[in-house]
Image (spheres, helix red, strand yellow):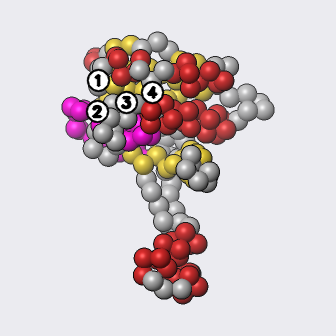
């Protein structure tokens, strides 16, 4: 990664931070989807104030890319027009190599926690009645995650779902930029600074 842009969320008394995260990340996701190449984004994200203990993303989002043009192409003005009062964006800058303190993967953590959804999938896949599949999952302990999350709304079916974001520190220096449509990856690390 060679370039970055910081976005700082500015909550107000009547507009809490979690609500801003939902709006900001939904718009970022749409911008990244529009710029996908072969199903991958050239722009990754990091959360400079990520807190595992506090299960918090805090209020800062960092966009990272190998090329400055990848960040410019996101057309942030188009997607963040209605959020300008609540999000401060810096200009695109070069990553200061002397300030890098390490590297990390910011990746999506998917958990199996919805019995009804799991039962519908099992019934369809196994060809068993839904009630039987639901009884199968009634005995199972559902997973929980300690990772912070942001609620998003599916553009396909309008369902609301949590996007759990896990951080894993690594020694792997980023060499490529192939991120998901959320700017996350379990293969491509990003610099921490």
Mark 3 or mark 4: whose residue is earlier in sequence:
3
Asked if disc 1 and disc 4 are in contact, CB closer than 8 Å, the reply is no
Tell me the SS state at disc 4.
strand
Quadrant of the rendering where the C terminus is positioned: top left
Which mark is on residue 177?
A: 2
Residue position for label 4: 62
User: In the rendered structure, which disc, 4 or 2, sits on the residue that comes first in sequence?
Assistant: 4
The residue wearing badge 3 is 43
Q: Earlier in the sequence, mark 2 or mark 1?
A: 1
Task: Look at mark 1 in the image and give the residue it sits on.
Answer: 66
Is residue 126 depicted above or below 4 in this figure?
below
Query: Residue 83: within the magenta?
Result: no
Which mark is nearer the camera, 3 or 4?
A: 3
Residue at image x 47%, y 76%?
A: 124
**Stretch of the chain drawn in magenta:** 166-184
For the question of whether residue 37 can be seen, the reply is: yes
């Amino acid at each position: 990664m060679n370039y970055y842009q910081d976005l700082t969320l500015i909550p107000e008394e009547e507009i809490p931070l979690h609500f801003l995260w939902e709006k900001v990340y939904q718009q970022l996701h749409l911008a990244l989807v529009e710029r996908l190449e072969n199903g991958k984004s050239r722009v990754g994200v990091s959360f400079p104030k990520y807190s595992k203990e506090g299960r918090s993303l805090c209020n800062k989002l960092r966009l990272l890319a190998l090329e400055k043009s990848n960040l410019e192409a996101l057309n942030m003005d188009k997607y963040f027009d209605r959020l300008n009062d609540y999000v401060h964006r810096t200009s695109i800058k070069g990553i200061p190599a002397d300030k890098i303190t390490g590297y990390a993967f910011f990746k999506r953590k998917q958990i199996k926690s919805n019995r009804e959804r799991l039962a519908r999938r099992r019934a369809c896949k196994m060809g068993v009645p839904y009630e039987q599949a639901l009884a199968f999952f009634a005995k199972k302990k559902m997973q929980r995650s300690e990772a912070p999350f942001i609620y998003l709304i599916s553009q396909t079916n309008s369902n609301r779902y949590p996007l759990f974001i896990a951080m894993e520190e690594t020694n792997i220096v980023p060499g490529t930029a192939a991120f998901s449509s959320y700017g996350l990856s379990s293969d491509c690390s990003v610099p921490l600074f």
